[in-house]
Image (cartoon, grey):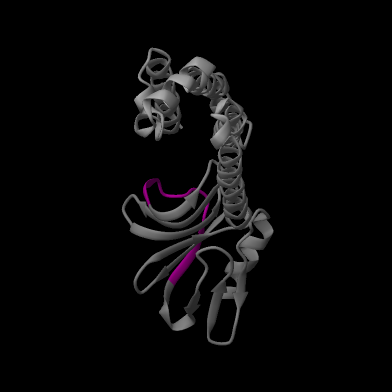
């Protein structure tokens, strides 16, 4: 939790620093500003466009810092809320600031920034939908199938051992996966086990640990009874 706190705090402080530097006159930090004609730059400065970009960055950072204490509460979706706030506030602010663009580029700016925001939110929405989708274990004739994101089929002959555990090994690195404060899906390095495949609802024991010929797999359900039924079926 502390590592996550410092990552989010670092992101907020970086935005705060960038916003302050831009407000102080480092307008070249704004994408494309340095390559505009001198006359156009002066018009934008007169309209307050780059100054407002700096203010937007500072306001975003301040909002993130105010939300950080939620990490130490029982609220389950803190990371999603903080990142969601950052994206919505930044992208929404950029769309709003298009009104301060030069008249010749204003419509194009509205269109481009709106498309970027739409693509970003749709992509994140799909990622969250499939990431939070429950993984199911299906028992077939030749093996088991784990459904959903990062799911795969595992032949029975490849399974060396399995057991129910009450506590997950500590994850040290996310290799290729989807991870939030509540979910861990994909490949993660676990202490003492190396790279393992996880389909975990955090804080919902028991967890089914399946050892195969080439990896360790951990899976559970929101419903502990379902997880136990998977272990019984594997017997």
What residue appears at the point 55 percent right and 45 percent down from the top-left corner?
Answer: 116
Where in the figure is residue 20, as x and y percent of width and height?
A: 41, 15
| Left or right of 39 in this view: 126 | right
199, above or below 39, in the image: below
Instruction: Tell which residue pokes out farthest to the bottom in this image.
Output: 141
Where in the figure is residue 105, as x and y percent of width and height?
A: 54, 36
> Which quarter of the figure has residue 214?
bottom left
Q: Is residue 167 highlighted in magenta? A: yes
Predominant SS along the magenta part: strand
Where in the figure is residue 9, as x and y percent of width and height?
A: 44, 25
Q: How many numbered callouts? A: 0
Q: Is residue 169 highlighted in magenta? A: yes
What residue appears at the point 53 percent right and 86 percent down from the top-left corner?
Answer: 142
| Left or right of 29 in this view: 100 | right
Range of magenta residues: 161-174
Question: Which one is in front, 111 or 75?
Answer: 111
Instruction: Tell which residue pokes out farthest to the top in this image.
Output: 24
Where in the figure is residue 192, as x and y percent of width and height?
A: 31, 53
What residue appears at the point 54 percent right and 18 percent down from the top-left corner?
Answer: 47
Question: Which one is in front, 43 or 207?
Answer: 43
113, above or below 98, in the image: below
What residue appears at the point 42 percent right and 29 percent down from the top-left corner?
Answer: 11
149, above or below 70, in the image: below
Q: Is residue 235 visible?
A: no
The C terminus: image quadrant = bottom right
Question: Which one is in front, 125 or 146?
Answer: 125
Q: Is residue 121 visible?
A: yes
Question: Which one is in front, 54 or 47?
Answer: 47
């Amino acid at each position: 939790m502390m590592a996550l706190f410092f990552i989010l705090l670092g992101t907020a402080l970086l935005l705060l620093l960038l916003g302050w530097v831009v407000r102080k006159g480092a307008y070249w930090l704004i994408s494309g500003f340095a390559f505009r004609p001198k006359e156009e730059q002066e018009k934008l400065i007169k309209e307050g466009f780059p100054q407002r970009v700096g203010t937007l960055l500072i306001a975003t950072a301040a909002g993130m810092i105010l939300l950080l204490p939620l990490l130490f509460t029982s609220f389950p979706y803190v990371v999603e809320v903080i990142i969601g706030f950052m994206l919505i506030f930044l992208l929404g602010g950029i769309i709003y600031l298009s009104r301060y663009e030069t008249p010749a580029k204003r419509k194009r700016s509205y269109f481009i920034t709106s498309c970027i925001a739409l693509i970003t939110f749709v992509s994140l929405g799909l990622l969250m939908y499939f990431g939070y989708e429950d993984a199911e274990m299906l028992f077939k004739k030749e093996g088991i199938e784990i459904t959903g994101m990062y799911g795969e089929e595992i032949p029975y002959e490849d399974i060396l051992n399995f057991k129910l555990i009450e506590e997950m090994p500590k994850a040290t690195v996310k290799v290729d996966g989807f991870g939030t404060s509540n979910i861990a899906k994909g490949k993660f390095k676990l202490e003492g086990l190396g790279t393992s495949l996880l389909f975990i609802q955090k804080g919902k024991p028991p967890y089914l640990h399946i050892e195969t010929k080439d990896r360790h797999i951990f899976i559970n359900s929101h419903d502990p009874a379902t997880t136990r039924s998977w272990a019984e079926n594997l017997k």
